[in-house]
Amino acid sequence: MRILWLCSLPLAVQQSALGGENHGAQVAMSWILAHLPPPPEVDLHIACLWPGGTQRKTVEFGGVPFHLMPCPAHGRALTLFQRDTGFFRPVFDELRPDVVHGWGTEDSFGLVARRLAPARHVIGIQGLITAYRARVPMERRTLLTEITERLTLRPARWVVAESAYSERAARPLCPRAEITVIEHPLRPEFLAAEPGDGSAKTVLFVGGVSERKGISDALRGFAAAEAADWSLRVVGSGTPEDEARMHRLAAELRLGARFAHDRGLAAPEIVALMQRSAIFLLPTRIDTGPTALKEALTMGLWPVCYDNTGPGEYLRAFRFGSLARDLEPGDLATTLGQALAERPWRDQESRAQLRAATRRLFAPAEIWRQLQDLYRKIGAAS
């Protein structure tokens, strides 16, 4: 079975296989890397755009070839990505894959997958600009990607959503599609590691430094929880403006040495930090299936989140964590303070059940079994 994935270039591939030279990678794309290596019976190829590149390049990483396809450095969104099919066409014609899987609708990957393989495509749904824009202020340029998102999904035949919330949010946009919910796997570092004992007095935030992820509410909630002997550790990056705003807020709240920020850490470093933490604080305003939340659950941290979208569903499903009233900072602080005082994560039976459930649900082998079933179904239907 030969499968072609279309997605953004993961940062680790740029740092490792490409020697750190800039090829357009900006984010970790950890859910992509968590799938690697694929099962022996899957001949997986991954194609990524290389903005400003002049000549196609192929590198090996995680047991699969990554094909970097040159494209213009700027302006693709202004044409609603109408030229992008041509950038990917050479690798498609060369490989003749059984199925083309486009990861995401905010760029051209889903759109190109559908155009390259009208009967043998699958479009992966993570976040949806249409849903996000209703709850989080966005820049005007996101209107262009929202139009692309609708053009991508309206005629889609096969769609895979990463969570039940993602499926519900996508369904009105793709009325003709058959939608399958398949979780994203976790990287082996998180599935293999032992959780900490829960004694550390550290609250951890892992995610983009942005208002969608609730960074300001996280800092304010921590400051208002009145836990002078606890510290808050933030791992994640954002725009220079968002990061500067976060540091100013930390100073205004007088968090001092109780606050620390890392722009980015490798998976083993995040694992070690989770082993030295007790609470995972992620008051996101809207999200589908935050990878960091799933990593925190499997590492035995007690999540504190707003009761909305994907985070609310995950905490209910696993019966582990605390939910504050949606977008109410005061209740977030109260909920966090209650967790700090009661330490519910010290229930070892609950942690053991959580560990077993997450390692089963988010195991790459289980995810690949479901993906292969879907790919075979697509092939048989075409």
Image (cartoon, rainbow, N blue to C red):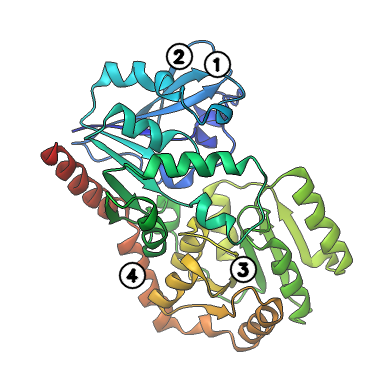
Residue type for callout 3: Pro
Real-space Cα separation, disc 1 to disc 3, in angstroms: 38 Å
Name the N-terminal-most of marks 1 and 3: 1
Mark 4, secondary structure of its residue:
helix
Seen at 26% across and 48% down, the residue is 368
* Left-right relation of 307 to 158: right
Label disc, if present, on residue 56 of the rendered structure: 2
- Would you say the residues marked 3 and 4 are in contact, meaning their CB atoms lie under 8 Å apart? no
Asked whether the residues under the numbered discs 1 and 2 touch, taking CB atoms below 8 Å apart as contact, a structural biologist would say yes
Find residue 106 and report its horizontal and vertical position in percent: 50, 42
Tell me how many marks there are. 4
Q: Residue sitting at 48 percent across and 56 percent down?
A: 291
Q: Disc 2 versus disc 4: distance between alpha carbons? A: 42 Å
Q: Earlier in the sequence, mark 4 or mark 1?
A: 1
Q: Which residue is mark 4?
A: 357
Dot 1 falls on a residue whose secondary structure is loop
Q: Are marks 2 and 4 in contact (CB under 8 Å)?
A: no
Report the amino acid beneath label 4.
Ala
Identify the residue shown where x is 64% and y is 87%: 338
**Residue 53: mark:** 1
Return the residue nearer the eye: 195 or 93. Answer: 93
Place of residue 191 in the rendered image (x, y in percent of width and height, measured from the top left): 40, 58
Question: First in sequence: mark 2 or mark 3?
Answer: 2
| Residue 137 at x, y percent in the picture | 67, 55
Q: Secondary structure at mark 3?
A: loop
